Image (tube, rainbow, N blue to C red):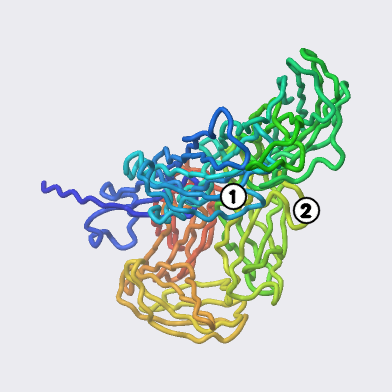
Amino acid sequence: MLERTTTVTVFANTNSCALDSIQIESGWDCAAYPTGADLAAYGCWKNLWLKADPLPSQIQLSVDRQPLAPTIDLCISDTMIFKMNSALANYSDNPQFRVTAPDGLTITVAEIEYPESSGNWETITPVIDNGIFVYNIEDHSAVGDAGLPGTVSNPGTANRAARLRLTYTTSCDFVSGSKVSVQQRGDRPCGSPISTDLGFNGIVRANPINITGAAGPGVVGFNINLAPGGINCGNSTLSGSITPSGESTSSGDTIVVTLPAGIVYAGNFVSGDGMTVVAGYPVAGPGGTQILNLKVPEGVTSGNTANYSFDIAAAYVDFGCGKLNISSQMERSIAPLMCNSVACPNSAKFVVGSAENEIAVSKPDLVLTGFEYVSGSFAEGGTAVVAVTVANNTLIQAPANTYYVEFFCGSNTTPFTSVLFPSEIPMSGSITENLTINIPVAPDCLNGESVTVKIRPVTAASQQQCLCSETSRGILAVLPVILDKFTARQNACSINLQWHSESELNFKKYEVEFSVDGRRFTSVATIEGRGSNNYYTFNHKPAQGRVYYRLRLVDANGASRYSNIIAMNLSCNGRNVLIYPNPVNSVLNVNLSGFAAAATGKLYNGVGQLMLTQQLVNGTNSLSVDKLATGTYALIVAEADGTQQVYKVQVAH
């Protein structure tokens, strides 16, 4: 027996980071299969599912050069260097250094080097995002639009890393002992942000920048605890204490607490030792942070403790999940310093003690993975049913009737409607719900505009929703024509196509397309649109055998889409039955041709139980099997004279 092996390479693109699969069907000598054959019943026909899981991305952040130590003169230039490394298989797209500079520190020059240690430094202009300096590695001319390569590309360690060099000076307002913090962000090539456990929002802080002459006696020890140990969508209590050593607290001592974007002060401040919140605080800090100043009581002696506590809560913002960092530092005033031999006008400050605490913020990470038209009038002024699929990528419950799904037309930033998602979104799973929406008329929505669906931390109606980040999906368009019927029947030795338009707005024509293999279609007729609520018919006489039809719907501005595909088995010599698709998920089509009278279709399960009975006529008959369990069934097509034909049907959900 002659054996031949053919290697087939499958290339696929995805716009989703969710786990998916691709069905591959294969066989040989396809022309020899009998007309109407159930291909799955043949041993030489194979069905294979390939797992499609986008490769992971990871970014790592470190400090390559610390500030000059032990001290640096005020108003003198110095440099710091930070490094980002792409550490896993896939590219790290849109990689960013996000720099927060303390008050009184000015970044005079910022340069990115790529590859690492190549000496190829280029000056980069930052984007200022709410007070944060954002340096995008892709702004370097040697870095492509895909970002930093991953290990699969195997470009070598240096080509997977870039460095940021900051040249800076300090001014009279700088608090000696303050630190520069750098946060990293990046995306996966499939579109979603890199997960927080693989580096997104990761932060490093350089060593303190200590100014010459800005020091005093004594230090302060910090102790900070959170109860419970993390935050979800409720409040938690942050408790802290300070313990002076070598010097008592003085009247000007202040604790500065920086709450990161994603955490907010929730009140309930308590201190039995005389500590208070400074009037006017908290205030907004750079990058969505919150600054809380606490007045330290005077005279807390060395070795004694002053306690305090207050509530914090998870903020309803994008990228508000993962390990976030709360920093605290106690500042003390001293005599003015000299800046380039000129006395500063105000007293100087230095950091007596500091603490950094990592807080885990955990909320459902919801992702919209599906958005499809189901039924109704998806046009201006219409009412439509759409299928929305939401995945929950965490082990945190996302309860039913909690999350509002918002719908937007075109570039509008205000949703035209919002619908409460009715089901619980299972942990590490997904669920699809049919939602009914009313589409407004122009100018709010225009035929041909895309429609986007979103779930956001804060809705347009100011409803706060417990999720990590905004998720959106926009694949539907308000179409100029809606079909509610498209059928085919055999009439003698020709095929009669019929369809009905529910609505035709700004619509031009139908193109009837024909195929003998279901893949390559050619146009066989053009029929001009006649307006909404119209019936159409077209007769075609192809050669006998399996044939396929579809409609191309063309609107007035040239945009188009396709109808579903109808399969027929044309036989002029007798009766014929065509069943598709098989395996079937929800609707099984049974196409009859050449029958003298109506037949009866009966579907039995594997143990002989009758599950479904339906009258069958020439043309396409639809049987709903979405409520049936996955398994093998037998379809019996019986005529009035007792003649029967049996077909195997595989139901797969």
Q: Quadrant of residue 248?
A: top right
Q: Secondary structure at mark 2?
A: loop
**Residue lying at the far front of the rendered structure:** 341
**Residue lying at the far left of the rendered structure:** 1
Q: Secondary structure at mark 1?
A: strand
Give the label on residue 462, or none: 2
- The residue labelled by disc 1 is 133
Name the residue rendered at 48%, 44% in the picture.
Answer: 164
Say which of 226 and 408 sits in front: 226
Locate residue 40, reporting x and y percent. Answer: 34, 50
Q: Amino acid at mark 1?
A: Phe
How many residues crowd around disc 1 within 10 Å: few (fewer than 14), some, or many (20 or more)?
many
Is residue 313 among the parts visible in the rendering? Answer: yes
Say which of 404 and 504 sits in front: 404
Relative to 322, residue 419 above or below: below
Say which of 176 and 242 sits in front: 176
The answer for how far apart the CA atoms under marks 1 and 2 are is 29 Å
Relative to 480, residue 72 above or below: above
Name the residue rendered at 30%, 73% in the picture.
Answer: 544
Q: Amino acid at mark 2?
A: Ser
Is residue 223 among the parts visible in the rendering? Answer: no
How many residues crowd around disc 2 within 10 Å: few (fewer than 14), some, or many (20 or more)?
few
